[in-house]
Image (spheres, rainbow, N blue to C red):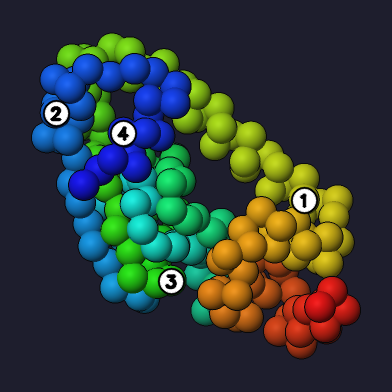
Amino acid sequence: MYNLLRTNIERKIALTDEEWDIIVSKAELVKLKKNQFLQIQNSNSCYEGFILKGSFKTYIVNENGTETVIFFSFENEWICDLESFYHQKPTTYNIKAIEDSEIVVISKMQKAYLFAVIPKLIKFHVLMIERANVAIQQRLLDVLHKTSKQRYLDFKERYPQKVSSINNKNLSSYLGVSHEFLSKIKRTVS
């Protein structure tokens, strides 16, 4: 059932069947319907997760009640509210399924246990954190230095199979533009 997860991990480190069984015993499969939450902003429940199927948006709700989408996450990707997970602080973000989804999650306590019994997972963890940091930096650079149209085209190129399934409200929030401006961008690149 978790073959996609095992393949993802084994791209970086080899696992024995016994090690894999231990990992599976500490992980939990969560199935969410479209619009169900994995995590709610300012709560105390945070997980690290690997998406087996579906899509998620990571966003905040501003003081005026508007959503700002920070990231989208899709199949075969990791998702986590890093500060909350690693420092046990209230969650910063909402994480919501934007389609029916299945995700394997693990708590910080279970992850610490896995590090103790399978130390080579620490190497995988370091590589994951490096990749997350690069993604965060790239997102920041894109927002600061690319036009909305460039960010849309980059997103469309990176996720061609997903761009049509994300509604304009979420995509315009992610790009930092109005719905009308996003429609204009889409018309110019079609």
Along the line of sight, the residue nearer the viewer: 79 or 54: 54
Which structural element holds mark 3?
loop
| For residue 6, above or below residue 93 | above
Question: Given this view, does label 1 or label 4 mark the residue nearer the observer?
Answer: 4
Let me know if residue 67 appears in the view: yes
Which structural element holds mark 2?
helix
On the image, which quarter does residue 166 sit in?
bottom right
| For residue 67, above or below residue 126 | below
Q: How far apart are the two marked residues, 4 and 3, measured between alpha carbons?
A: 24 Å
Which structural element holds mark 1?
helix
Q: Label 4: which residue?
A: 6
Q: How far apart are the two marked residues, 1 and 4, measured between alpha carbons?
A: 31 Å
Q: Residues within 10 Å of mark 1 (few under 14, many from 20)?
A: some
Along the line of sight, the residue nearer the viewer: 104 or 170: 104
Along the line of sight, the residue nearer the viewer: 134 or 87: 134
Q: Position of residue 86 (x, y in %)?
A: 37, 34
Q: How far apart are the two marked residues, 3 and 1, measured between alpha carbons?
A: 23 Å
Question: Given this view, does label 2 or label 1 mark the residue nearer the observer?
Answer: 2
Instruction: Tell whether 30 sits left or right of 79.
Output: left
Q: Label 2: which residue?
A: 21
Q: Residues within 10 Å of mark 3 (few under 14, many from 20)?
A: many
First in sequence, mark 4 or 2: give its number.
4
Instruction: Tell whether 37 sits left or right of 25.
Output: right
Q: Label 3: which residue?
A: 98
Residue 84 disc label? none
Q: How far apart are the two marked residues, 2 and 1, measured between alpha carbons?
A: 40 Å
Let me know if residue 81 appears in the view: no
Q: How far apart are the two marked residues, 3 and 2, measured between alpha carbons?
A: 30 Å
